[in-house]
Amino acid sequence: MLSALLLCLFAAPGFAATFTFTAIPDEDESRLVERFGKVADYLEQRLGVEVRYLPVKSYPAAITAFRLNQVQLAWFGGLSGVQARRLVPGAQAIAQGYEDQFFRSYFIANTSTGLTASEQLDPSIGGRTFTFGAKGSTSGRLMPEFFLRQQFGKAPEALFSRVGFSGDHSMTIAQVQAGVYALGVVNYLVWESELAAGKIDTDKVRVIWQTPDYPDYQWTVRGDVDAVFGVGFADKLRAALLEMDDPALLEAFPRKSFVPASNADYQPIEDVARELDLLQ
């Protein structure tokens, strides 16, 4: 009864509800706040309601904020999106980056290892130190672990001498470049972005293998936004995302453009997550 009353209150004429969104913290937080603040301004203009970006400290925090309705929209990775939609009935993936239809990860190595780029992972990676990104990352943990198990038939902890979790892709690159870990795995777009920005010393770290493609990031919206913000709001939001064409805004992700997405697109991610026992 209380929830129904609240929905009526929020939907009442003259009530200025704030539409809030978040994004998984896959890079340095200060960078994300600057970038997504501009996205909030764009959405506010398109949607006609106040829009706010809420930064979070971790992947689980993004999922929790979505579950508790602290945010109504989230830029999730493949795995975090699957986890969030399982916790919020009616939640829908509504848009993905053009590149997310065929995403991939880069395995990287400190050049002191002597490892170079190859068609398959070199068996000599075994016995070395290795770091994933965040534990809940699709490109920095889920799919790389799947491919490692597929090729070597064993868990990462059995393959490497030490396994770490850096927390985000930028930190993975920094740690492998500094020799804290011999090897790591990262989101390929973060690598390409930091390489273009001159933040990677290729005399110290290099890409040694590229994974096969898989679906990844997407915008996921709660199923009750029409009840709160008005009938047709979800469609209006989807249109705003799909029609985003300002290069400065798209650079926040970074993506070429956004294309339609659905929950069914992420069934392969859910299947792998279930196989690795990573579903909440």
Image: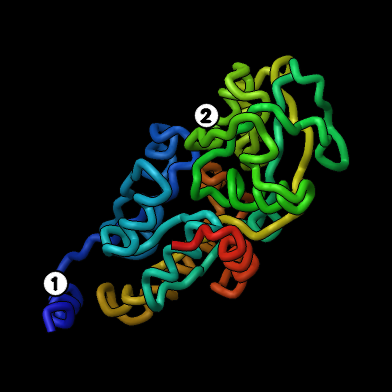
* Numbered disc 2: secondary structure: helix
Name the residue beneath numbered marker 1: 14
Residue at which label 2 appears: 171
Q: In the image, residue 118 lies at what x, y percent?
A: 86, 36
Query: On the rendered structure, is 139 left or right of 82?
Result: right
Q: Is residue 246 visible?
A: yes
Q: How many marks?
A: 2
Name the residue rendered at 85%, 42% in the picture: 120
Left or right relative to 273: residue 233: left
Q: Residue at x 65, y 42 (%)?
A: 156
**232 lies left or right of 166:** left
Q: Quadrant of residue 222?
A: bottom left
Q: Is residue 26 left or right of residue 216?
A: left
Q: Amino acid at mark 2?
A: Met
Q: Quadrant of the N terminus?
A: bottom left
Name the quadrant containing residue 269.
bottom right
* Pointers 1 and 2 in contact (C-beta within 8 Å): no
For the residue pair 99 and 178, the one nearer the viewer reads as: 178
> In the picture shown, does residue 62 fall above or below 112?
below
Residue 35 in percent (x, y) is at 44, 40
Residue 168 has which mark?
Answer: none
Taking depth in this image into account, of 34 and 239 the one nearest to the observer is: 34
The structure residue drawn at horizontal position 32% and vertical position 64%, both measured from the top left corner, is: 67
Q: CA distance from mark 1 to mark 2?
A: 45 Å
| Rendering coords of residue 200 (x, y %) | 64, 22
Residue under the point 26% across and 59% down = 70
Q: Indicate which label's residue lies in the foreground, 1 or 2.
A: 2
Picture colour scheme? rainbow
